[in-house]
Image: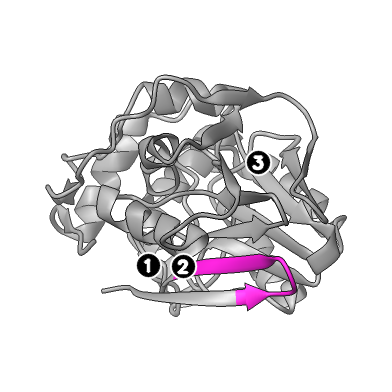
Amino acid sequence: MSATAITRIGTHSTAYLQLPGGWFHNNAGWITGERHTLLVDTCATEGRSRALLEAALGPEPKTSLTAVLTHAHGDHSHGARQVVEQDGAVYAADSAVEEIHAGPHTYPELFEYADWGSIDPPEHITPVTGRTTVDLGGTRAEIHPVPTRAHTDGDLVIHHPDDGVVFTGDLLFHGVTPLALHGSIAGWLEALDWLETFRAETLVPGHGPVVNHADSVLAQQREYLRWLLDSTTEALPDFAALEERARRGWPEWHDAERHSVNLRVAHAENRDHTPDIADAIAAMLGAAGNRIPLEL
């Protein structure tokens, strides 16, 4: 089960945390100015997204609404329709827009869950093709496309300089095993270096607690991503042994079955092959022992 925590960060920014941050328990948040609220991400189900919107806007909204989706994965994007129903606009990276419109993606072969509610994507999502500054009234927020293929090929981060906060989306996981299924591990490492250039005092990760001392969390995730690449250079790695080594190396991380996917993505990357997504998902299902039941 997840516990929702609403954490105020500075004058304008608020983090909406679904802790501890496992499967489909993502973080979101909002930045509120005098005239406008910028929502960062939505939630996995209709009900959770409606609760997020109520927390962000209150029962009688006093500001207009824009939502920015940090990437296309359903835990962050399934509530886009609820934003539009609140007369809000939705933005995402250009490649993420296409992926979202191809959904919703619930992976029934991997997860046991049925009560998603209304999560079909809205007809229109505006693509973000470059750095964009949003005037919220009395304060500004910045939308930055990630310069490399990283967690996915359509990642965004949202920077609020006045509060010294960056909403990282799934560039950063805290206490949860990262997932490289749709990304590039080498590109992700580059993206973490780029993330540090913001010199933000606070990072809101895509999953897990807020990060106030970024160095240790960033360093741990870098160590893991580099280990994935360094451990999968052989033509036929012993994936079972490597999965066990990863579980021992990062025992505090939730969702350890993701190691099996990440190792196969790293191996394909080392061999300059496109990862076999079906094979990677099958390996994760094997590591989990069965379909994964969700409590959302």
Relative depth, front residue between 47 and 286:
47
Q: Residue at point 37% right, 35% down?
A: 81
Q: Are marks 1 and 2 in contact (CB under 8 Å)?
A: no
Mark 3 / mark 1, whichever is N-terminal: 3
In the picture, measured across the screen, residue 53 lies left or right of residue 70, that is: left
Q: Residue at point 55% right, 37% down?
A: 152
Name the element at disc 1.
Answer: helix
Q: Marks 3 and 1, how far apart in space?
A: 32 Å
In the picture, measured across the screen, residue 45 lies left or right of residue 89, that is: left
- In this view of the protein, can residue 89 be seen by the observer? yes
Task: Name the residue carrying label 3.
Answer: 156
- In this view of the protein, can residue 70 be seen by the observer? no
Mark 1 / mark 2, whichever is N-terminal: 2
Q: Residue at point 67% right, 65% down?
A: 13
Amino acid, disc 3: Leu
Name the element at disc 3.
Answer: strand
Task: Name the residue carrying label 1.
Answer: 244
Q: Is residue 280 above or below residue 130?
A: below
Q: Is residue 72 above or below residue 185?
A: above
Q: Is residue 21 above or below residue 260?
A: below
Q: Residue at point 41% right, 71% down?
A: 247
> Looking at the picture, how far across and down is residue 50, in whole percent?
34, 54
